[in-house]
Image (cartoon, rainbow, N blue to C red):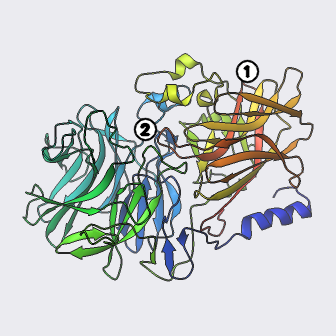
Amino acid sequence: MKKIVMTSFIFIITLFVSKAQQIGSWGDQGDGTYKNPILNADYPDVDVEKVGDTYYMISSKQHMSPGMVILESKDMVNWTTVGHVWESLSWVKKYDWNQMNGYALGVWAGDLAYHDGTWYCYVIDRNYGLFMSSAKDIRGPWTEPLLMLPPNEVLDDPAVYWDEENHQAYMICNTGKFKKSRENTLEGNENRLYKMSWDGKEILDSGEVIYTGPGAEAAKIYNINNTWYILMGEWYVKKPRRSRKIDSPENDRKQIVLRSTTNSIYGPYEKKIVFERGNGIERSCSQGALMQAPDNTWWYTHQLIQNIATPFQGRPQLLQPVNWVDGWPIIGEDIDNDCIGEPILQYKKPIQGFPIDAPSTDDDFSNTTLGRQWEWNHNPRNSHWSLTDRPGWLRLKASMPLSEETTKGPGNNNWSESTGTTFPFWRASNTISQRIMGNTTGEAVAKFDLSQMAIGQRAGFVRFGGVYHVLGIYVDNLGGRNLFYVNKDGEETKGPKIKSNDLFIRTSNTGNQAYFEYSLDGNKYEKFGSQFTLKFGNWTGDRLGFFCWNDKEEQGVIDVDWFTYDYDGPKGVYKK
C-alpha cells in the first residue's frame, strides 16, 4: 500500500471511484438509448465476432505495441478492453526500440474469427505480407505470427470465412493491382478471393478477382439466409481526374454491398450502395462489421474515415441499425429517400439492461502487469521500465535517443513529415501512451517523482499523434532540475528550477486546442508553454502519455504515481 497522508488518500479515492457510471455527449445515455459515436476515440479498422452472448472487437493501431487491441461488449454499445493480439510487433526488427522506423506501418486493418474452438486474427503489414496468429482464449496467449503470403501479393484488409456446407475456408483481401474500374475513370483496387486450408494457416491457390473499384477495400464476407454478401468501402468522386486526391472533402467513401443469390461464393454478384455520409455527419462513413442481436435485429459498427479535415481524436466507431429492404442490408436511416442509408445520431440500444462502461483510462499502477489501455511507441525496451522495482509506481528508466541515421529507412513514409526538428522525441524509446477520448473537452493529470533523475535526463508528459508537445523536467550539468516545454517544431521554452521531488502535470483540451499546467502540491496549478493544436497523423489520433530519455548516458529514472483522465463521455467503474 502507498505511504501517503490521509488527505491525499481521500483525494486519490475520489479520483478513482467517484466517476463510476459517468455519461456524456456520446455513447450510452443511461436511459436505454445511445448517442453516436459509441467509441469516440481512435478505434479504426474494426472487425467483430460474437461468441455466446459476448461481442469481441479488434482495432488496428499501426506502430503502437502491443498491437491489435481487443475489446468486448454485451450490448454493442459499452466496450471494454480485454487485451491485444500481439504483445510485440515481432515479425520484423524495424518495430523494435533500437530501430523505431515503422511509423504509420505495422498493424493495419485485420480480421477476427472463431472456428472450431480456436480464435484467429489475420492482418496484412503492407511491407511484409499476410500474417495469422491464433489462440484458444481470446485473452491469449496468441501464437507467434505466421507468414501466409508475401507482401508483393497482398496490400491490406484481409477477411476470412469458413463455409461449413462445402467444407472450404476462404480469405478475401485488397491485392492492390490498380486496374481501371469500368464505371469510373479513377484506378481501382482488385479484391481477390483465395481458398484457405481448413486449419486457417495456409493459402491454397492464386485467388480469383471478385471485384475491382476505386479505393475498394475492407471486405467482410457473410452468408445470410443462403445468400452471399460481401461488404466493402469504395470511393465515389464528384469530378474524377488524376490530379484530384481521392480522399479530398468533396469525395465520399460509401459502404457498398455485393450480393449473390447463387450457391457459390464466387458469384456472380450484383452491387448496391447501402450507406453514405449525411444527417449532419461530414466525414465518410464506411468500413466495419455486421452484428446480430438476440432478437434477430441486425446492426453495423463503422468508423468515420480520415480525410483532409480528419479530427484530432482519430477514427471513432459509430453504431447503426440495419433494415433489410428487398434482400439488401440498408444501414442507418434512409433520410432523403434515395434507398441509401445515412447515419443516425441517437437510437435505442440493441440490447437493454447492461451498465454503462468504457475502456479503462485511470491507473494507480498498483498491478504487477501494465493496464491494457497503455501502448508503447514501437516495441518497448523491457529492461527499461518496471511496475515491480517500486510497487505501486510505473518506473521509466532513461535510454539514449537513437541517431537519425538509425531511425531512417525504406518504407518509413511519414518520417520526414513527422520530425522536422532535431528534438529527439520520435527517436526516443519507451514512450507510453493511451488514446484520448472524445473531441469536446478533456483533462488528464499525472503525479511524478523526480528524486532519481540524472544529469542529461528529460522526462515528463507528452501529447502526440501527428505532432508532439511535451512538458517535463530536464536535468542540467550541475544537477539542477529545470521545467521545460517543447512544441511540434522542436522549439524549447525553459522554465523555473524545480526543487520539489513531486511534480504534478495537467493537460486540458477544448476541441483541438490544448495546453499544459504544472503544480508542486497537486492543488495550485500554473500554465506553462503555449496553447497548441492537436493533430491526426501517422494514422494516429492524439494520445496522452509519458516520455523518458537521457541525452548523455543511460542514467536516471522517473516514477509515475498515478494518472487520471476526465472527459465528456461514458466512463465505467475504475478497474484494477
Query: Dot 1: few (<14), some (14–19), or many (≥20) neighbours within 10 Å?
Result: some
Q: Quadrant of the C terminus?
A: bottom right
Total labels drawn:
2
What is the x, y in percent for residue 508?
71, 52
Task: Say above or below: 324 vs 479.
Answer: below
Please give the name of the residue rendered at 40% of the width and 42% of the height, measured from the top-left corner. Answer: 144
Q: Nearer the viewer, mark 1 or mark 2?
A: 2
Q: Amino acid at mark 2?
A: Gly
Toward which corner of the image does residue 91 lie, by quadrant?
A: top left
What is the x, y in percent for residue 110?
36, 49
Please give the name of the residue rendered at 23% of the width and 57% of the height, measured from the top-left corner. Answer: 161
Residue 106 numbered mark, or none: 2
Task: Say above or below: 39 vs 451.
Answer: below
Q: Amino acid at mark 1?
A: Glu
Judged left or right of residue 546, residue 248 is left
Toward which corner of the image does residue 572 lie, by quadrant?
A: bottom right
- Which one is nearer the viewer's eye here, 435 or 142? 435
Toward which corner of the image does residue 469 lie, by quadrant?
A: top right
Q: Residue furthest top?
A: 405
Judged left or right of residue 503, residue 113 is left
Secondary structure state at the residue bearing disc 2? loop
Task: Say above or below: 452 vs 287.
Answer: above
Please give the name of the residue rendered at 39% of the width and 52% of the height, measured from the top-left corner. Answer: 45
Judged left or right of residue 243, residue 552 is right
- Which one is nearer the viewer's eye here, 120 or 499? 499
Residue 448 numbered mark, or none: none
Q: Quadrant of the N terminus?
A: bottom right
Q: Is residue 388 visible?
A: no
Residue underneath mark 1: 553
Secondary structure state at the residue bearing disc 1? loop
